[in-house]
Amino acid sequence: MDSSLLDENYWDERYKTKSTGWDIGYASPAIINYAAGSIAKDAAVLIPGCGNAYEAKALLAMGFSQITLLDIAPTLVAKVKREFENNPNIQILCQDFFQDQGQYDYIIEQTFFCALDPSLRPSYVQQMHTLLKPQGILMGLLFKREFAQQGPPFGGDQTEYQHLFKSKFDILHLTNSTNSIPQRQGNELFFELRKKLSTCPA
C-alpha cells in the first residue's frame, strides 16, 4: 500500500468500521509484566498508536500517574477521552506521532511500529530517540515474521531490527517473547532499548 494512504483518514475509517484485527481486547501480558517489575509508578510513559488503550487502563490500575496516549484517529481518540474523562493521571493526544514534542522516561511499543510503512522506520527510530529523556527506555513487542498480505501490518526479523536500532539505542533485550498471546506465540520479539547518550555510528 502507498504509504501516503496510511494517514489519519485511513486509520479513522478502520475504527469507524471496527476493522481492527490487531485489537486483542486486553493488555499484552509481556508489556504489563515488564511495567509491573521495571517501571517506576511516577515515570513519564508514552504509548503511541494507543488504540483502545488497554495497556493504559492496566497501568492506571497499578498506580501509574504520568501516562500519555497518542493516536492519529479522531474517532478513536474521542472515545478514549470519554473513557478517561477527568482522570488527572493521563493525557490523550490526537496527533501525528512524528509531531510530538514531549519528553518521556519510557515509551511502550505495541502494534504501532508494524502499522507504519517500512519506509518510515528510520524516522521512527530518530523520533523515539528524540522523545526519550537521557537513559530513557523504548520497550515492547515486534513481529518476527513477514506477512503474506499487503500491509499493514508490516513484519520484520531480529537482524533487521538490530541494524535499525543500534546507532541510536543500546540493545538491552531483543529476544523471543516468552509470554505472547496465544495467537502470536512464536511470532514476536520482546525488546528493551536504552537511549544512547552518544549516537556516533557503531
Image (tube, helix red, strand yellow):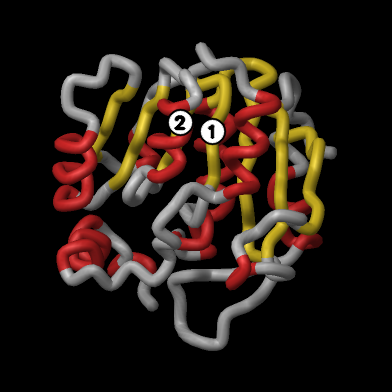
Give the percent coordinates (x, y) of residue 70: 34, 38
Label 2 element class: strand
Residue furthest to the bottom in view is 148
**For the residue carrying disc 2, how many other residues have a C-alpha within 10 Å: few (<14), some (14-19), or many (20+)?**
many
Question: At 55% from the left edge and 50% from the top edge, which residue is drawn?
Answer: 28
Position of residue 185 relative to residue 1, above or below, is above
For the residues labelled 2 and 1, the Cα–Cα distance comes to: 5 Å
Nearer-N-terminus badge (2/1): 2
User: Is 87 left, or right, of 35 in this rendering?
Assistant: left
Give the percent coordinates (x, y) of residue 22: 43, 66
Which residue is labeled 2 in the image? 46
The picture quadrant where one finds residue 145 is bottom right
Q: Nearer the viewer, residue 92 or 134?
A: 92
Give the percent coordinates (x, y) of residue 31: 60, 42
Disc 2 marks which amino acid? Leu
Disc 1 marks which amino acid? Ile
User: Is 161 left, or right, of 46 in this rendering?
Assistant: right
- Whether residues under marks 2 and 1 lie with C-beta atoms below 8 angstroms apart, the answer is yes
Which residue is labeled 1 in the image? 107
Can you say which quadrant of the picture contains the C terminus? Answer: top right
